[in-house]
Image (cartoon, rainbow, N blue to C red):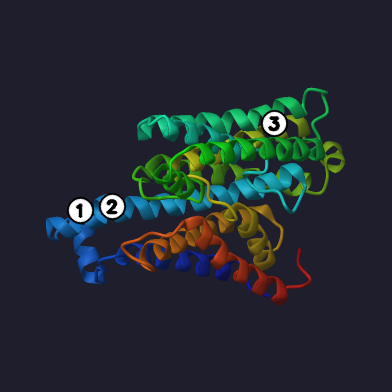
Amino acid sequence: MKSTHLIFIGLIAISCSAILIGLTSGSADISLKDLLASLSQNNSPTINTLVMDLRLPRVLSAFAVGGLLSVSGVLMQVLLRNPLAEPYILGSSGGAAVAALLGMSYGLSAFWIDAAAFSGALCATFLVFGIASSSGNWGPSRLILTGVVLASGFSAITTMILALNSEQSVRGMLFWMMGDLSFAYSPQYLLWLLIAISLIAIAAARYLDILSRGELQASILGIRVHVFRIAIFSITALATALSVTAVGVIGFVGLVVPHTVRLITGNKHRVVIPASALLGGSLLVISDTLARTILAPRQLPVGALTALIGVPLFLFLMKKSPSKS
């Protein structure tokens, strides 16, 4: 059995390699020597601008969002006790899409589109929570059912918005809906949020382990389940809303990365949380690098690449580890 230390060494190596490849690859490749010179501001202004102003913020944003979606997926699967749970299951992506597409339809600036997406994601998530908890009993099944129904409504509104807009506008809207890191140039707050949420989740790993076995057992052991569930719900809502605001809707990462990590490491959240952050970040960085290099200077939707990379990887690991859940 692989030790935890070796697994983390491997994941850190994958993360560093993914970031390095993301910084050196693109429509114009950069050598490792030029990259190191740019990081120390000792290169030509053109290469410095390419690395420091364009690629580095984009790569770090991709890593932060991939990590946030993966950790949020882990927390949602604990909250809902459902292996199919993922960050968007409570309608945040649908609410963000409706609000952002309406902003694009009216020609709003990037700032207001981001603000609309953030507000839409939070409003949709808390609308699901409000409806599900109106009876005083907001169990996992009620939350999931409410989220699925509202997501269907948001999907219908999104389809109508796309149908009523011009072809030129629809292309930009579709790219946003499938994930677009072209304008992700402020990774700092995303990285700090990823670090903060990961540390909080690691500190609460013992309680997550207990809660994942059932609310009754958690209550017997003295955990205030209601308060703990609200905390998980609020943290995942914030992380998902900020991720959608930064790069649009990128599916799949928050669903499959947690399962892939559990197949490798087991179910202890003390290990699953940081491993998911590293693997999710690496997956999105690699996907974004491929999206902007395969047909450069054209860019592919990064959400499609995450699925193309992640599905075979997950199926391979599942075949190799049939006894793990």
**In the image, which disc is placed on residue 128?**
3
> Which quarter of the rendered picture does the C terminus lie within?
bottom right
Q: Which residue is mark 2?
A: 54
Kind of residue at disc 1: Thr
Q: Position of residue 229 (x, y in %)?
A: 72, 35
Disc 3 + disc 2, Cβ < 8 Å: no
The residue labelled by disc 1 is: 49
What amino acid does circle 2 point to?
A: Leu
Q: Residues within 10 Å of mark 3 (few under 14, many from 20)?
A: many
Q: Residues within 10 Å of mark 1 (few under 14, many from 20)?
A: some
Q: Secondary structure at mark 1?
A: helix
- What secondary structure is found at the residue carrying circle 2? helix
The alpha-carbon separation of the residues under discs 2 and 1 comes to: 7 Å
**Of the pair 187 and 214, the residue shown nearer to us:** 187
Mark 3 / mark 1, whichever is N-terminal: 1
Marks 2 and 1 in Cβ contact (< 8 Å): yes
Q: CA distance from mark 3 to mark 2?
A: 37 Å
User: What residue is rendered at 45% in x and 54% in y?
Assistant: 63
In the foreground, 57 or 111 = 111
User: Tag 3: residue type?
Assistant: Val
